[in-house]
Amino acid sequence: MKIKPKRLEKGQTVGIIAPASPLYNRSDLIRGIKTLEEWGFKVKVGEHVNNKHEYLAGTDEERAYDFNAMFVDPEVDAIFVTQGGYGSARMIRYLDFEKVKKNPKIFIGYSDITSLHLAIQKYTGLVTFHGPGMAGFNPEDLSEYRKNHLFKALAQEEPIGEIPLADEKKWINIINSGDAEGELVGGNISLICASLGTPFEIDTKGKILFLEEVWTEPWILDHYFTHLMNAGKIQEAAGIVIGECSDCEPFKHNPGFHVTFSLEDILFDYLEPLKIPAIHGLPIGHTKDLATLPIGVNARLEASNGKLFVTETGVL
């Protein structure tokens, strides 16, 4: 059963947790808190947010504690992560999804947080949000597009509607034309692949699947698409939306063989024969102008026009 959190309103309290990697600079947290307060929100920081355990923001148990605590805390209305990185999946076995289900709240993040989106959706049905971490809530990183689409997704009563390009000079690559409607699911492609074989692996049947990635060579993306195809996840989708995929080009080293495929070559190689409506290039994922998407709500893909519409609100 689908569950929706209450919409974000000024005066509410935003809880901050670090489910994955630690912040490189603690000032990123301070700046993010300042921005949230300037927007009219109160902020409550998780007990272990500034912890470090090698490349993780604390032990698995510490990070899970903050996650569980924020969901049951009656003072907290929404939960923002600091950033992604690595490690969210490690703490899933310590999460109390019954408490999440009984205390539905806005939960937002992307990249490595994809693992948590998948698990929350599987075990609770809660609509979560694929959007920015609050470490980037500062004037240097927070574009007007990113800010506006954050509030469109979290605070307004009406559905988001069209997810437009942030820059009219950019291009939407139409891989297959046609229209499709279905529930919006997806996230970072490497984390989606990592979910296969787990109890919370992604369900794409009849759905609009969005995928994004960053700093990944084309031959590795080829591996990810091969894995998703072999698992039947691409073929089962009603439509496919690929984000910008920043810096997904061959690195400056010799991998032992000629790197000739580009990302676009791979997308056409895998998706075009399926005849499923598919586009590439929307501002989803690791891009400065990141559109926040509610996961688990209805959407419409008009691939012939290169457009994606979110037709159902993710909040109450």
Image (spheres, rainbow, N blue to C red):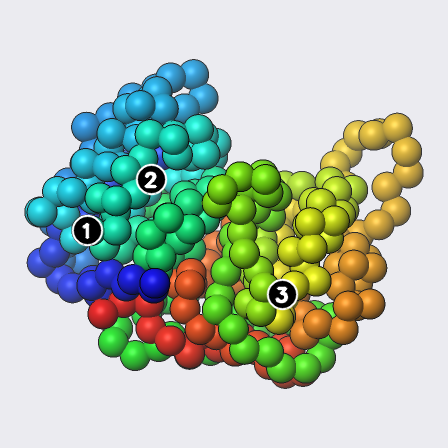
Q: Name the residue under label 3.
A: 237
- Which residue is situated farthest in the right direction here? 258
Viewer-nearest residue: 154 or 68: 68
Local secondary structure at mark 2: loop
Q: Residue at x 19, y 28 (%)?
A: 47
Q: Name the residue under label 2.
A: 82
* Residue 37 picture location, percent across and down: 15, 50
Between label 2 and label 3, give the one nearer the viewer. 3
* Residue 75 picture location, percent across and down: 8, 47
Distance Cα–Cα, label 1 vs label 2: 21 Å
Mark 1 crowdedness (10 Å alpha carbons): few <14, some 14-19, many ≥20: some
Q: From the viewer's perspective, tell me whether residue 240 is left or right of residue 58.
A: right
Amino acid marked by disc 1? Asn
Sequence-first tag of 2 and 3: 2
Sequence-first tag of 1 and 3: 1
Which mark, residue 103? 1
Local secondary structure at mark 1: loop
* Residue 174 picture location, percent across and down: 71, 73
Between label 1 and label 2, give the one nearer the viewer. 1
Mark 3 crowdedness (10 Å alpha carbons): few <14, some 14-19, many ≥20: many
